[in-house]
Amino acid sequence: MELKNKTIIVTGASSGIGEAAALLFAAEGANVVLGARRKPELDSLVDQITRRDGNAACLAGDVTDETYSKALVEFALEKYGALDGAFNNAGIVGEMKAIPAMDTENWNAVIATNLTGAFYAAKAQLPVMAQQNSGAIVFTSSFVGHDNGGMPGMAAYAASKAGMIGLTKALASEHAADGIRVNSVLPGGTKTAMAGDDPDAHEFIANLHPLKRLANPNEIAQAALYLLSDRSSFVTGTALSVDGGMAVRLL
């Protein structure tokens, strides 16, 4: 069991990659602390995990609120007495428009959720991990935020996800001496609610990938599991592409 007796926070846990990660981490022995805005979905996921003899608890809230990130860490400590890792996965795509047509409110919402939310999460998690002299943090970035990943109409999303890669590298450098590893996963197109439910759109996106398909959420969760586990004990500051070959295609 890769995460036996470790306490792991998962944000964006109510669906998609976050939900898959919560189920996987719990199956691998973790105490999972689940965060998202939708409490009914979180409660259902906790019930699902506990019925499988796993350990899970949840606290609903919005990652754009700094006090929520602090409360989620405090909740993990109260519930399980430690914080060994975090999968900071919450994110939104926002409007897909060229910059001249994009509402400023949309830009602000995407940056606030994806990038500032990641900052708030790390700011709350790092001091606890530093005190323990151990810990692992994983962010969900995207191939869209990578060097070769520019996609028309996705400026806000791309900027936020590129910023997360920069944040990853800076935090990895700052906190290596504290025994903390910080990495990112960069998913390609994935079968989640964020991808919508239009079969034609799915086919179009799938065909952009050299592997000619979308990822299942569990495939992204498996990469996060690796980065949170002791198997990646010498890995920090990396942006791990789990993108069906998109990085290769865009070279």
Image (cartoon, rainbow, N blue to C red):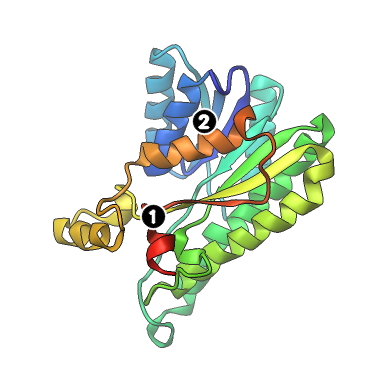
Quick check: 118 left or right of 219?
right
Q: Which one is in front, 148 or 51?
A: 148
Image position, residue 208 (x, y; %): 28, 63
Task: Give the labeled residue for mark 2.
Answer: 58
Image position, residue 184 (x, y; %): 57, 50
Image position, residue 194 (x, y; %): 33, 54
* Residue at horizontal 79 percent and vertical 46 percent from the top: 175
* Residue at horizontal 71 percent and vertical 34 percent from the top: 135
Quick check: 136 left or right of 25?
right
Amino acid at dot 1: Gly
Q: Is residue 169 above or below residue 138?
A: below
Quadrant in the rendering for residue 220: top left
* Residue at horizontal 37 percent and vertical 35 percent from the top: 41
State the SS at label 2: strand
Q: Is residue 169 above or below residue 14?
A: below
Viewer can see residue 122: yes
Quick check: 177 left or right of 13?
right
Viewer can see residue 15: no
Residue located farthest toward the left when viewing the structure as drawn:
200
- Residue 188 marker: 1
N-terminal label among 1 and 2 = 2
